[in-house]
Image (tube, rainbow, N blue to C red):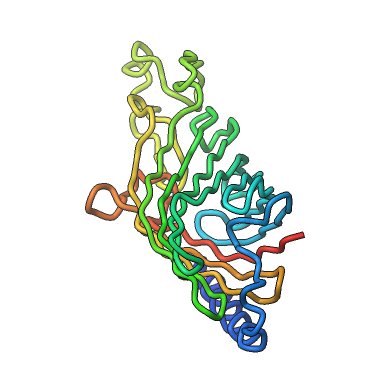
């Protein structure tokens, strides 16, 4: 029941935004060549993106275009249990024509020290390569593959973990306190620090659509399936549900 209640608002937003964007797009197709790029603000321009989805219930990005084909954005968002902060780097790898290109985007997110993360800070990154086709209407359709990697920040820096009640228990005390700790619940909706777990890597297959609403305003959506090899990611996946969904609006200044 919780899953249904959580996904229904997301589905409503998808339908409403999509219909609204299609209607506005049909009124302004003649100006399609002037539409802003949802991923790449023009050189020396900035862009603000706000949205929602899974696992982030709210996320915002403020990006700067160093060139028309390379931009860097500042990210801030929150899941239902923990906030995240970071950067997103985007660059065009290959562009045959105005109607086709291959680009890479790589968000790098930092999760601060919280109880829900096993008492330690974490880092997650999701680099992906995408092929994108641009229609005459200005709508862009993309598809690609990526990798999600999550790791404990202290492990990356080689910092020894402090042993607290919210983290890994010392082995000499584990047997003595077995009654209290051996059956401690581990939920699948948090990045929990477990003994022997230093991080993990998953692969994704994703697709996305961007629809120009006006010259500077763009609706964008992205849907990714998270896999562990050739199978759906299980409870070890840090995002709880084995999908990544984003629905948002971008505006270039």
Q: What residue appears at the point 46 percent right and 53 percent down from the top-left corner? A: 103
Q: Position of residue 189 (x, y in %)?
A: 45, 48
24 and 58: which is toward the camera: 24
Q: Position of residue 3 (x, y in %)?
A: 45, 65
187 and 237: which is toward the camera: 237
* Location of residue 200 with respect to 218 vertically, above or below: above
Which residue ends up furthest to the left in the rendered image?
A: 230
Q: What residue appears at the point 55 percent right and 80 percent down from the top-left corner? A: 137
Q: Position of residue 127 (x, y in %)?
A: 44, 45
Which residue ends up furthest to the right in the rendered image?
A: 253
Which residue ends up furthest to the top in the rendered image?
A: 172
- The answer to whether 106 appears left or right of 40 in the picture is left
- The answer to whether 6 appears left or right of 27 in the picture is left
212 and 158: which is toward the camera: 212
Q: Position of residue 40 (x, y in %)?
A: 60, 56
User: Could you say which quadrant of the image residue 248 lies in?
Assistant: bottom right
Which residue ends up furthest to the front in the rendered image?
A: 97
Q: What residue appears at the point 37 percent right and 45 percent down from the top-left corner? A: 147
Q: What residue appears at the point 43 percent right and 61 percent down from the top-left corner? A: 96
Q: Is residue 3 visible?
A: no
Total marks placed: 0
* Location of residue 132 with respect to 195 vertically, above or below: below
User: Could you say which quadrant of the image residue 253 lies in?
Assistant: bottom right
- The answer to whether 19 appears left or right of 239 in the picture is right
Q: Quadrant of the N terminus?
A: bottom left
Q: Is residue 114 visible?
A: yes
């Amino acid at each position: 029941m919780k899953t249904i209640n959580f996904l229904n608002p997301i589905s409503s937003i998808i339908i409403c935004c999509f219909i609204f964007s299609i209607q506005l797009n049909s009124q302004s197709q003649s100006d399609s060549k002037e539409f802003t790029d949802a991923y790449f603000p023009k050189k020396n321009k900035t862009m603000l993106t706000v949205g929602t989805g899974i696992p982030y219930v709210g996320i915002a990005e403020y990006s700067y275009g160093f060139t028309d084909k390379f931009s860097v954005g500042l990210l801030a968002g929150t899941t239902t249990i923990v906030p995240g902060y970071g950067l997103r780097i985007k660059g065009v790898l290959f562009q045959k024509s105005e109607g086709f290109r291959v680009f890479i985007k790589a968000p790098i997110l930092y999760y601060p020290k919280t109880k829900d993360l096993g008492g330690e800070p974490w880092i997650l990154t999701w680099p992906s390569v995408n092929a994108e086709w641009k229609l005459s209407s200005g709508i862009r359709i993309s598809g690609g593959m990526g990798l999600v990697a999550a790791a404990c920040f202290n492990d990356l820096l080689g910092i020894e973990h402090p042993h607290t009640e919210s983290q890994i228990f010392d082995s000499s005390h584990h047997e003595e306190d077995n009654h209290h700790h051996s059956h401690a619940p581990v939920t699948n909706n948090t990045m929990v620090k477990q003994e022997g777990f230093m991080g993990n890597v998953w692969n994704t297959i994703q697709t996305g659509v961007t629809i120009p609403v006006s010259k500077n305003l763009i609706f964008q959506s992205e849907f990714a399936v998270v896999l562990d090899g050739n199978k759906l990611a299980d409870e070890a996946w840090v995002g709880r549900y084995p999908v990544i969904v984003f629905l948002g609006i971008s505006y270039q200044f």
